Image (spheres, helix red, strand yellow):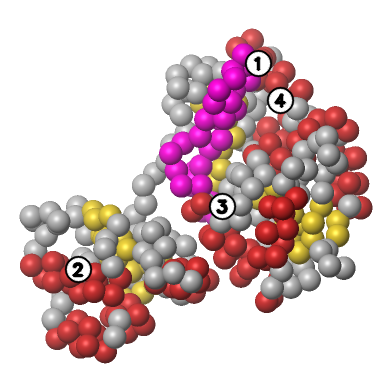
Amino acid sequence: MYDLDTDRKHEQLIQLLEEFLGEPRKHYASKGQVSFDCPSCSAMKGVEFDGKGNLEVNYDMGVYNCWSCAETHGTKGKIYNLFKEFADRELLRRFIGGKFTFTGDYYTAKEFVPKKEVLKLPSEYFQLVGKQNYRDFKPAFSYLYGRGITDEMIEKYQIGFCLGGKYQNRVVIPSFDKEGDLNYFVTRSISKYTKKYKYLNPEVDKTEIIFNENLINWDKAIFLVEGAFDHIVIPNSIPLLGKKLYDKLFSELYFKANNLIIIVLDPDAYEDSVKIFNKLNAGRLRKKILLNLMPSDHDVSSFNQTYGQEQLKTWLKQKNYRLND
């Protein structure tokens, strides 16, 4: 099950971890890291194991960190604390009795941040800022201007275009996490002849990212929208990349949002909007959740395309309401 070069002490430690964390999801022997389902995240969802594998344990350094809830629930620190918090007394006793030693310089470091795989933009990606007069990029600008996307938006969201390769003739909208690292991107074909795969995105679990987290002001009203093009035309918005509110985004909103949260999904998604409203409208967010239903013939992006930014702002201000008011 494990690499042959993993020493016996590490095997013993991993076996102890398995007894209360379950089957490992991934094991990187070269990094000295093994991942499990986070018991804290799983408990929040009311399940024993959530299948996400967000809890990274570095057995060289003797530390752990959950990608999803380290900041909100403090699920990080020394392995001893992991056993103390989630294992029973017998397992904690066996861990202490194992007299495990760790080679990493954790005790002089303030925090352990596990290594994560790096996502890259397509090699054919060109940022569009300043390329309005380049012949090769005129079709991209024509498409974006036609959807009501301005030069200011193109610059703010670092919108690009691919001339060739897998994403040929596609507009690219990148997403960055709070550290400014790429965590996702959306590509949209500009060709009217593309009937299948109009959108083509990387093989990244979208439920584990916050789209353009680096641009969110948690102290201002936050808009929840469906897609990346809706996101571009509404400042301080977060696209769901669909119609569901995933657990990671729910957790971030619940603990970080300090103002109103306004749900603005497509007109055919009323039931989905209600589900999201009911999920968010509790605890510290109670009475801070609003719905905004777009007219039956427009989503956010097409409304902006047809009526412009000022009319969209007016709609968003005047058409908000709470359920059961």
Magenta span: 177-206
User: Which amino acid, mark 1?
Assistant: Lys
Q: Is 309 displayed left or right of 73 in the figure?
A: right
Q: Do labels 4 and 2 touch, CB within 8 Å?
A: no
Q: Quadrant of the C terminus?
A: bottom right
Choose the circle earlier in sequence order: 3 or 1: 1
- Taking 323 as reference, is 314 above or below it? above
Q: Do labels 3 and 2 touch, CB within 8 Å?
A: no
Which residue carries the number 4 mark? Answer: 144
Which residue carries the number 1 mark? Answer: 192
Q: Quadrant of the N terminus?
A: bottom left
Choose the circle earlier in sequence order: 4 or 3: 4
Quadrant in the rendering for residue 216: bottom right
Viewer-side label of 4, 2: 2
Choose the circle earlier in sequence order: 4 or 1: 4
Which residue carries the number 3 mark? Answer: 210
- Residue at figure coordinates x 38%, y 59% from the top left: 51
